[in-house]
Amino acid sequence: MPMVDIKERSPRILKGALFLTSVLYAFIPVLWGAIARENVTPMRVSDLAAQQKRNTSAIATILGEFRTNLSDMLFIKTERYLHGGVAYMPHIDTEQLASSGDVMHSKHELRRPATSDAETSVTELPNTDLPTTGPGDQGTPAGKEDELHREEEAATLIRTPENDFRGFLGTLERTVKPWRDPRLPHEHIGGVELLPWYRLATLVDPKNVRAYMIGAWWLKTIHDEHALREAVKFLEEGIRQNPQSFQLHLMLGYILRDLGEKQRALSAFEKAVTLVAKQRPPTGDVGPNWTIYNEEDAIAACSMAVLQRRELHEDDVRGLEDALHRLRELRAQFRNMPVLERLERSLSSQLEAARKTKS
Amino acid sequence: MRAIWLIARSVLLEAVRRKEIYAIVLISCLIIAGIMSIDFFGLRGLTKFYCEVSLQVMSTAAALTTIALAARQLPREFEARTIYPLLAKPVSRMSFILGKLLGVMLAAAFCFALFMAIYIGGTIYMGGRISPLLILQYVYLQLLGLLILATLAFCLSLWLNFDAAMTIGAVLYFAASIIMTSISYLYDFVGSVGKLVLKASLYGLPQLRLVDLSEKVVHSDVWSPIPAWAIAALTCYAFVYSGLYLALAYISFRRKPL
């Protein structure tokens, strides 16, 4: 009955519009097929590269904090909090932040000065005489409060005076909003205040491995037993939700090591190695599914599984022998990991020296 | 002057008696308390999250309350026909509108004062840092923003119905940040006509983002209060827009047949 009414009463233009809509509706599957054939960027939170790309796009910059999900909002929050509220164009490499705690630009990959009095980064190996875990990893600090360091220029969201067409409105915005001249060194402030945001992010999306990693890393920087225990609980929750994430096991191992729980730390590192063996491409080649950060973390997992064995023994010679034995197993298992080769040389010479001392 | 005050007082008393403000404050506090009840690793002193969430919830609630209060003042007088006995008295239409506006602003200030008392109490309880001058500047600038929204809602309520006026006011409030950022961002990518349109939008629309000091309040460990000249300039800026909207509201009100 209502259909009859519409047909009788609607003007011709409305009928035309209805017809057009019906035709378009019928073509939706065709359109969808055409779109699907294009190289569409996946929109899943778990796809970190896609998320990084999405969050540095123009539309994301314009929308700011009006984002589709908390995970994306976290991206903005991390940028803002680490810069004392200053809105730079998104540039922090959150994958690097999740991996090592290093606050770095996503494109510039700048490293901190080697002279900085460093707190140990999570991918750094414990002994200074041992090789670093990956290319360019200096084991540098990130959570250190009020650290200033020179970075390549990253534009601010608010225009600079020389580049501003808005006249006095621009001046007012630069005065009212947190703004620093982008040519000045960036001021990185500790990210501990970000912790509630990471907790919230994992509650909303328990598959957000990066939030677990960075959250645990910031907790680790507090250097307090309570915070470390909380980090363990946080990571265990993350592992329950993401059992295949070897980085979470690796991070758990680091924190247990800080807590002095050597055996549990070794188990965590070994679990990480087991998962690496399942996920790493045979030659360790970097690709869309295996990033440079994955490779760095895989190397770190293997190195820590070796070095932690050494710490388990009170006798240095026995510890080194055990570590070397495990290292040789890992070298046979993982191809194209030159760091392990260097580590073997280093441990062998240390073992020789220890034997001489003992005898 | 006395007429303005009497009208303002009646608006304020009505707003307080209707207990809407208390309900809004209570709901906002429940939202904040709900979020803060999540266990953030049992750590104390993580105050920036509290500050950010509280200020966002409070300023949004205060803005929506102000828009709703302002948008309903004039249409309701017409609907209930209470405007006739009022204007039969020696009260000019300008005094009437000014009285209503003052009443709405007093109610908004009352609402915001309640929020600020809760905010400051909460921050002190959590061991956070309070910068009194920055907070004062924040409150003052928020009130300037509410003034713009109230006059805009007055103006819209004389042309449109309550729902439409309320919606447009709310959209302008929520989109304030996006509007300014997108104008700034898009400017380099458009032609000369586009540039002209963007510039016209920049000056044609009140940029409420300019009167929001919340980011500096949240990161008050890094930022100091803004200089007096900026406060003066923002006061002039807000008065220009609210004056314009008030003038438009007055013209519409004068032309409105009773």
Image: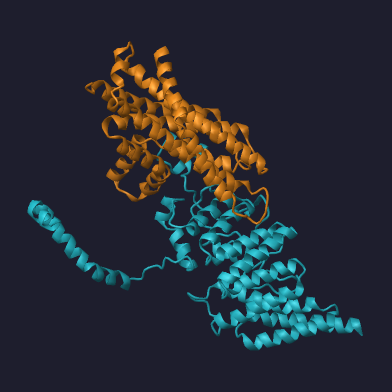
* Above or below for B1 versus A101: above
* Residue at figure coordinates x 46%, y 28% from the top left: B17
Q: Which chain is cyan?
A: A
Q: Quadrant of residue B149?
A: top left
Quarter holding the C terminus of chain A is: bottom right
Quadrant location of the N terminus of chain A in the rendered image: bottom left
What percent of the width, then of the height, locates residue B69? 39, 31
Image quadrant assignment for residue A95: bottom right
Residue A180: tell me if it is visible. Answer: no
Q: Please, which residue is most extreme toward the right here?
A: A359
Question: Chain B in the picture: what colour?
Answer: orange
Q: Position of residue A36 (x, y in %)?
A: 32, 71
Coordinates of residue A264 in the picture (x, y in percent): 72, 74
Residue at 38% x, 40% y: name it: B170
Q: Which of B145 and A157 is in front in this view?
A: B145
Q: Is A48 rendered above or below residue B192?
A: below
Q: Is residue A63 left or right of residue B224?
A: left
Vertical order, A129 against A172 (above or below)? below
Q: Which residue is rendered at x = 68% and y = 49% of the image?
A: B44
**Position of residue B96 in the picture relative to residue A346 (left or right):** left
Where residue A29 appears, as percent x and y from the top left, is 25, 70
Identify the residue at image location x=47%, y=65%.
A45
Q: Compare residues A278 and A89 and report the one nearer the observer.
A: A278
**Residue A330 in sight here:** yes
Q: Which of A21 and A246 is in front in this view?
A: A21
